Amino acid sequence: MSLEIPVRTNDTISIDGAVKIYGAGAGQHVALNGVDVTIERGQFVSIIGPSGCGKSTLLRLIAGLEEADAGEVSVFGVTPERACAAKMIGLVPQTPALLPWLDVLKNVSLPAKVNRGADRRRQKIGGHQTKTAPDMRDLLEKAGLGDAVHKLPAQLSGGMQQRTAIVRAFGVQPDVLLMDEPFSALDEFTRESIQGQLLDIWDQMNTTVVFVTHSVTEAVRLSDKVLVMSAGPGRVTASVDITLERPRSEAMLKTPEFHHFEDTIRDHLQSAWRQTPSTSSTAA
Amino acid sequence: MTPTDTAPRVDTAGTGSPLPQKKTPVLPARLAFVRPSYWLPVVALVVVLGFAWNFVASGNPYLLPPLSSVGEALASNPGYYLHNAWVTLSVALIGLAIGFVASYVLAILISELPIARRAIMPVAVVLNVTPLVAIAPALVVAFGFGPEPKLIVTALICFFPILINVSTGLRSVPQSVVQVFSTLHASRLEMLWRVRMPSALPFLFTSLRIVFPLSIIGAVVAELAAPGAAEGLGTVISIASSNNRLPVVYAAIFCLAILGSVLLAIITAIERRALHWHESMIGAKS
């Protein structure tokens, strides 16, 4: 490039020295202290850590829902705000957050109806490949919601509601999907099968995913890379590459390789926990 | 232990046997009201109240007319009551419509702009605590005996419940939903139209169930405050009571009670349709 602009690469989500402080004075709480993270396009990255370690805060920084008090956040070369304006970000919150008066199909189709100028803005941002809009019925079918297309959210089980929320987020073909403990309210059976479905859709849609969780098994099964965070103040203490081959079926959960990665991450979590100052463990 | 001891027991039967069936009730749920257990309690109470009424009336005919004479008053000139009921009803509904539009627009303003909230809410609260019965005569003096003061009183009485409920409802959207749509960069207008206004519907219907009967009260209060007015059930009551025609007074009151009940029934039916997705309605069905 001829311009003297620091070249932020279009192919990573990068967080440099992010600091986030809630409150002020004596009551202030440092949620994040100098967090550096780089996530490559197409990767499935999980962030794991105890409650209060700032993993959701980190996700909200990427989503542009909060601003860092210091440091830089770049989503494929642009600010989170520009990324949102171009509909490059899909969010799956902890609760399904469906609109109860719309049936499943209308719920997942709604994002296409808001912010219609996004596609134009998106084309101006480099590095983005234009994809054709997915057929939402087709996507629902793949998520196992084919029979529920015209049902209301209140008529669905918790797992089905969360799958609907995932399809809704995938539906805008986001460059990155941000998921904030989406399966934490589900029972174990549902969770394991929904993980498989998520991986299937992710495989087809070829999207970057940042997945916040507090389940080690979930993190290992889903991710290419697991970032371990610790609290007081929140920081990334380890980054573990999960080299298990894909596709990862439920059967893989029983293999020794899988357990090896689980143990590695548990070790990191425990050592981070021991280093945490005792004062903050109560605050967390 | 042999492996057979620890092997989990699997029930392979059960798939072939027929599934148990729930007995279908003789009457479908929507016809449940034909059962005596459904309607008998209220009918019994009404009959008891009717006897009590006639017992009191027989001792004090100048304070309370017997039900039979109220019935005669109604039957002798049903067109008269229908016409006056229609006059009162149209005032009530037009006033309600005016109050609805004004309060809904202000509710949107209040929920979107904190500065509007700080300006409008104190005034609205003071207006709400001021007794309308006291305002009505002043409005009649200011606007004369035409429809204007009646419409204003009715609109005012409907204004506050809608304002409070709708402005609360517009802000009742869960934080997670707001976050999903703000990452999509939905505009404020899109957010309002597609998310906030539907979210506020249950609150709107709660307020409508309050203000539909209230609108009748507003219209009657205005009619009573404007003694020169020619028509309306309120006028019928004030003229008949000054002429000591008690059966007519109670006939008009009876009409007002019917009017209010019918309005309430209509709004409840509409609510049931419009909010079929809402938890309160889903609970009511089962």
Image (cartoon, rainbow, N blue to C red):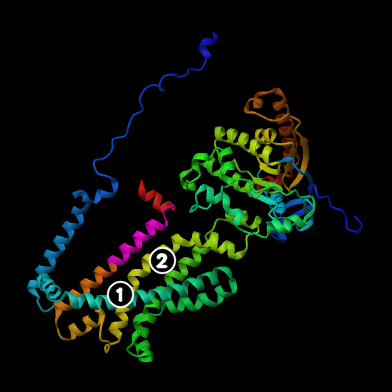
Q: Quadrant of residue B217?
A: bottom left
Farthest residue in the left direction? B58
Q: Is residue A186 above or below residue B121?
A: above
* Magenta-drawn segment: B261-277
Which-is-in-front pick, marks 2 and 1?
1
Q: Are marks 2 and 1 in contact (CB under 8 Å)?
A: no
Q: CA distance from mark 2 to mark 1?
A: 19 Å
**Viewer-side residue, A205 vs B53:** A205
Report x, y in % for residue A166.
60, 44
Q: Residue at x 40, y 77 (%)?
A: B155
- Seen in the image, is B75 located left or right of residue A257? left
Q: Residue at x 47, y 69 (%)?
A: B164
Image spot of residue B54 (x, y percent): 10, 68
**Tag on residue B89?**
1
Which secondary structure lies at badge 1?
helix
Q: As displayed, is residue B146 above or below residue B258? A: below
The disc at residue B207 is 2
Q: In the image, A19: left or right of A95? A: right
Q: Crowding at label 1, few (<14), some or many (≥20) Cα neighbours within 10 Å?
A: many
Give yes or no for residue A67 being in the magenta stretch: no
Q: Nearer the viewer, residue B137 or A40?
A: A40
Give the residue type that dot 1 points to.
Answer: Leu
